[in-house]
Each structure stands twice: as structure tokens, then as C-alpha cells.
Image (cartoon, coloured by chain):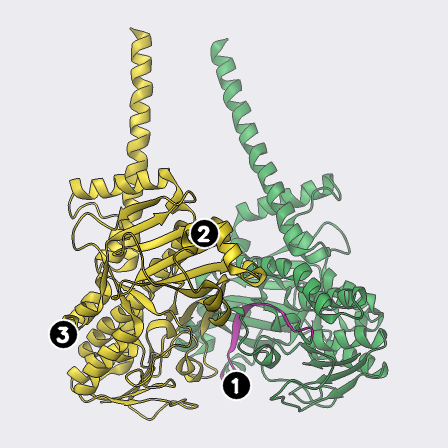
Chain colours: A green, B yellow
Amino acid sequence: MKIAIVGAGPAGSLLSCYLAARGHRVDVYERRADPRRYDDAEGRSINLGLSARGVKALTDVGLMADIWPLTVPMRGRAVHGPDGKVAFHPYGNHQEEILHSISRRDLVVSLVAHAAGAGVAFHYDTQLSALPEADVVVGADGAFSTVRTLMGRGARADFRQEYLPWGYKELTIPHMPVHHEALHVWPGGDDGLIVTHPNLDGSATATLFLPYDTLAAITDPEAFFARRFPDALALIPDLAKEFAERPVGHLVSIRTAPWHHDGHVVLIGDAAHAVYPFYGQGMNSALEDCTVLDACLAEHPDHPAAAFAAFEGRRRPHTDVLDELSRQNFVELRERVRSPLHHARKRADLMLARLLPGRWVPLYTAVSHTTTPYADALARAKRQDAVLRWTAAGVAGLAVVAMFARKVR
Amino acid sequence: MKIAIVGAGPAGSLLSCYLAARGHRVDVYERRADPRRYDDAEGRSINLGLSARGVKALTDVGLMADIWPLTVPMRGRAVHGPDGKVAFHPYGNHQEEILHSISRRDLVVSLVAHAAGAGVAFHYDTQLSALPEADVVVGADGAFSTVRTLMGRGARADFRQEYLPWGYKELTIPHMPVHHEALHVWPGGDDGLIVTHPNLDGSATATLFLPYDTLAAITDPEAFFARRFPDALALIPDLAKEFAERPVGHLVSIRTAPWHHDGHVVLIGDAAHAVYPFYGQGMNSALEDCTVLDACLAEHPDHPAAAFAAFEGRRRPHTDVLDELSRQNFVELRERVRSPLHHARKRADLMLARLLPGRWVPLYTAVSHTTTPYADALARAKRQDAVLRWTAAGVAGLAVVAMFARKVR
């Protein structure tokens, strides 16, 4: 088949590897410049956290060996308290239950080099105003997908686009003095949030999330940091300059249905399901899409319409759940990581996972360290939560019975 | 001010009357033909149910006297059972708690004639590709608003569009033998729904709502009616012909925010908030928008941005509630109107309203027969429901206490 992929980000580039390996003729169209030749700044999120799903999708097509050297392990969260104290919370019970920080550009360049070697043709600086000619067109062109707009014009489509009332700025930490192999968090409640990802050179990229009103009201970023995030201030020497020069990033969530039209066009990644970044699963779910779409196309080699319908049916219930989880984790990151009760609950969860290996899987573990489909992971977590609640109620009930027993005697 | 209104439907035409009365210079642009010269078929919903909100909006600008003669009262619902029996349920306790059926075309022609007499310029057959030049542009161009697309391109906007998986066809009942002054309902559960509106000439317009799958599977409409709606079959002599010729209508719900941009553009009616038609409030809420927007512009005569912000702040919480109510009423119309328990509950509600005039207002009454803002109507109904539940619980509790009292003696 002649396949056109629109968008050469992580999802589009990886899918081209999968489809080229199946022997299809693949062209990839990208409106930006070739990242192999230019640095793709544009104020986009520079670091990403690769987790089990992304690793699996890259491994299945033989790419992970090239990518490991580009990653920095993140073994847990380093949570910065208002007193400047840093508490480290591991991501899981096992050595391999960790995340991997990678630069978006490094990942894409590696994928594109591999795809180009496999015969995929990349067309950069190409803004499309109509769908390209091909047997199948894949929209991997992100949250504001042109393919989505052009696909099935006038046909019934459900669509939801929501902006978080918070924007973000990226700032540079040239040297992270403690816990380099961690995702650092400064939870600021309703007033802000900083998250950092480590880089290979010992530096880290900090993302400052703030409500738009707060962002707009900041005239002196150093004074703001001194008040809100005093221990972060010392880590960001170019704060004033970077704050002035870097654009404000926006956070958008998108759901749409259907994902395909007429056996000719199909959407993957952010074009089909954009989520807020707080579960770190946006890219991972996009890479996982490639595995699922490739499998569906292989199951229906002569019937793209059936393949696309199977893809959406198999995938959308799970990405819908990911959307919910990503919203909830925004609350967790900015609020609950500060709460001792929350950590006690998390520790109990991890302890039960150690006691009941394979039978008790905390939600975060299932989402980040396994490839269990998102909705299945959530359903299991709900059952486990119910068990914990009944156990607690049972303990309380036994205590009451014991009290009565003493009185009766 | 020079004001351009895009869309000459009920909302755009009525708003032009309001704004012309304030002395503004108003131009109205409409992509369809002039309804004063052509019949506007296009398979659109032909009859509408005017209720208290619409009547108030038309009365405030002095139009209702011309419109009364074009309406047919609908005094309640005539519910057709599977056995062919018809049960009549009045809409309220009072003579004036009724709805008024009107043809969309008659209403629009009347509004346009009035507006044109007040100096408004109407430009028909005009498809815009850019916003018209004016101090203020009002998008009254419906659910698929071009103004909404053009307004603030690239600015952050929340948006949700959902299609009901049901379509509809309009069919003609030349003569309604019983209860002409009623809205007839054939509730078909998950399999279909017929609703009719009376016309001035004794005929009625029936709207057949069906799941898309069911609609597509019908090869012999008469056989389908004979099986599902046997007593309706006899009323629609041209069923086969109309079913074949009339287009399938779609039902879309739209929420969007913001409703305005830069003190220059504002949305009203379906362009700002399209709802499913099952509460009969789509047009009424659009007409009510005109009253509220006119009041906001009068409060901020030199500051459209403030007027638009006030309009959205005052109005959107209520149209969001209307969206929810319209979804719930779809269930009510196709399911619950058949349930004796539901009617007992409705009768209790109406009885309490008679006993406590002005202090107990059933939800349907508040939505359809008053101008209480939608969210306030819903909040009151929830309080009343809680009272009813507590009363029921209290009665049950007293019964238990009485039982114990007997035993103790």
C-alpha cells in the first residue's frame, strides 16, 4: 500500500518504521524543518518521560537499543517541601519500575534516521492544505491536526477541546545538586507547580506551571520565586532572562470520534486524543497507538476500513480513561504529593504489591510500568480500593465488637 | 454603533429588532434566501414550541401581538400507548401554563418584517468568508457558526460538539383527530420516538426520531410503522413518499467558551449553545439571549467588551444547565412518559404547586412557564426533590415507630 503519514513527531516517525517494516511505501509530511539539520525549539516541551508502553512500542520494532543511551533514568519523585527539604519517593518496588527522561529531539532524530534507512521518504517544511494522495492517510499531526479538520468534512463528528486555565514556561537548571536521576516536583497547590526532567549532561529542564492570571501578573520572576519556590530560585541562574524570552505554553485536552473516515484516513496520537501532561503518558500512549494500529492493519491487510474500526474500538476506551487519569494526576502533583496521608496510602499500596506480587498492582504502577490497557488498569485499581476500604471498615467493626465484648464480660 | 448580525434566524432577527430600537445601525447577513419570498424547506425543523421565555423576549420589544395569531396552543402532552390509547397530561395547573406551536418560517417572516420596518438592512444569499466590517459582529449563525470559527482564530477556546446517535425525519399528519391542541408523543423506548406539533390549518407536523442503525435498516416504512407505531400509521397517508424524499436530520449539542472576542465579536443562540430539542427550549433560550445581551449592551453602552463579558457571565451557567436538562428530557420523552410511577410523581408535583402557589414550582413549570434562569430552576427542583424524599422517609420512620409503640404496649 502507498501510505502517507502527516506529522513527523514521535508517533508519525515510529509508525513509519512499523509500516516500512511491513513492506508498505511510506511518505511522511511535516510542516516544521528537518530536526536532523535544525534544532526544533518553538518552545515545545523538550523532555519527555518514556515509560513501559513507549519502551515496548520502540522495542517491538527493534529501536530501543539505539535509544537507551539517549535516556536518563528517573527512579522516583523528589518532592521539594516549603521548608526546602527534599523527600524522595521511588516509582516502584523493582529496579526496572522507573521512567526514562529523553529529549524529544533526540528521540525523533533517532526514529527518523531509522525510518529513512528503511526507505521512508520524509518531506519537511510541507504545510498541507488538502489530504496527500495515497491509499491510506494517517493523521499524526498533533492536537491541532489538519488531517482531522480535512477528514470527512461535514460528516457527523463528536469533538471536545478543553484548555487548562494554566500555562507553562520552560526554564533551565544547569546542575541539579541532589537526586539527578529523579523527577523533581515543587507542589504549589492552586498557585503553581514545577516539574523537572534530567538531561544527559547533568542539567535538568524545569517546567513551571502557573494559572494564567498568576503568570500574567508576574513582573519580577526572581521576587516571585523567592516568595513561592525559594529553593528553586538558586537552581535557575538565568531565570529573569528565560522567563522574559520563552513563550507561554498552553495545555489542551482533545477527544474526538470517529478516528477514521471511509477506509482512507485515520488519526493517531494527539490528533486522536490529546491529554494534559500530568501522568506523563501523552507520548507513551501515542507510541502505543502505533503498535495497535500496526496490529490492526496486519489483521485486515486488504480492508483498511475494518482495520481502522478495530483500531478505534480497541483503543479509544483506553485513551478516554487516560484523559481522566491525566486530569486527576494534575491534582495529585500539585496537592497530594505534599500530604503525609497520601504517602501512607501510596506506601500501603506498594507494600501490598510486594506481598502479593502480580496480584496487587497499584494504579500508577499499572499505568507507568506495565502495558495493561488504561481502562483495565483503572478497573483493577477500583477493585483494590474497594478491598482496602472494606478492610478498613472490617478492622473498625472488629474494634467495636471487641469493645462490646469487654463490656458484656 | 454599526452592528453586523450574521444569521437571520429567530435569534438574529429578534436581536436586530432590539438593537434597532436602541438606535443602532444594524445589518443582517444570511446565507439562505429571503423567507419572505421563498419557502425555506431544507428539511429543517418546521414547527417550534414557543414558551414563556420566548413570549417574554418577543413581548419586550412589542412583537407578541403580531405573533399570537400565528400560534396554536399546546395545552399538554397526548401520550399514545402501545394499545392505541391516548392519555392527556396537562402542562400545568393554570390556563396560561401552556406552550404555543408556531411555524419557524411564520415567526421569522414576522420578525424580519418588523425589523425591516425599523430600518434594519437584510442581506440574503450572502455567504461570508470573513467577518463583516462593523463595530460589533454578532454570530447568530447557528450550531455550525462561521462567526465562531473566524472569531479569535488561534486563541484558546474550549469547545464540545456531540451528536446524538439518533436522526430524525419530518412527516405530515393532514388531520389530527383527537387533542389537536396538544403535543402528541409516541414513546418508543430505545427504538424510536414520535413527537408532533399542531399547525393552524388543523394538520400537524410529526417528527420521527430513530437510532441511525434503525433508520438505515428501514426498507418498508409502512411495515415498520405497522409494527412499532400502528396507530400513527393511519394518520400519515403519504408516509412512504415522505420517508423516501425527506432528508435525515441530525441532532447536535454544542458548548463553547468564550462566547466573545476582543470587544468586537459575540455569539448568541445555537452558535453559543446548541442543545438537543427534547426540552423544547432551543429557540426559547436563543430568544432569551437577545433580552440579556440587549440589557448588557445598555448597561455598558461604550464598552462592548464589558457588555459581552457580562452577557456570557450571566448567561452561560444557565445554558449549560439547559444542555443537561435537554439530555435528560430525551430519556423522559422516550421512556418515562409511559411509566405510571412517573405520572404519579408528576401529579404530586403539580398538586403541591396548587397547594403552595408560588412556593412550590415543578421543574418543568419553572423551565417552560416562567423566566426563572435555568440553573435557578434546577437548584429549586433539587431542593424540592430532597423535601419529597425526606417526607417519604419521615412517613416510613413514623410507621416503624408506631409499630414499635404497639409492641411495647
Q: Which residue is mark 3?
A: B62
Q: Is-magenta flag for residue A16?
A: no
Toward which corner of the image does residue B101 lie, by quadrant?
A: bottom left
Residue B274 lies, in percent from the top left, at 39, 68
Q: Which residue is mark 1?
A: A245
What secondary structure is found at the residue carrying circle 1? helix
Distance between the Cα atoms at labels 2 and 3? 42 Å
What secondary structure is found at the residue carrying circle 3? loop
Residue drawn at (77%, 66%) of the image: A57
Above/below status of B86 relative to A133: above
Q: Nearer the viewer, mark 2 or mark 1?
A: 2
Q: Residues within 10 Å of mark 3 (few under 14, many from 20)?
A: few
> Badge 3 sits on which subunit?
B
Q: Which residue is mark 2?
A: B229
Q: Is-magenta flag for residue A262?
A: yes
Farthest bottom residue?
B133
> Badge 1 sits on which subunit?
A
- Region rendered in magenta: A244-263
Residue A392 lies, in percent from the top left, at 56, 33
Residue drawn at (48%, 82%) of the image: B154
Kind of residue at badge 2: Phe
Distance between the Cα atoms at labels 3 and 1? 57 Å
Inspect this view and state whether residue A83 appears: no
Above/below status of B312 relative to B225: below
> Badge 2 sits on which subunit?
B
Q: Residues within 10 Å of mark 2 (few under 14, many from 20)?
A: many
Q: Is residue B367 left or right of residue B85?
A: left
Q: Nearer the viewer, mark 2 or mark 3?
A: 2
Q: Nearer the viewer, residue A332 or B147?
A: B147
Kind of residue at badge 3: Gly
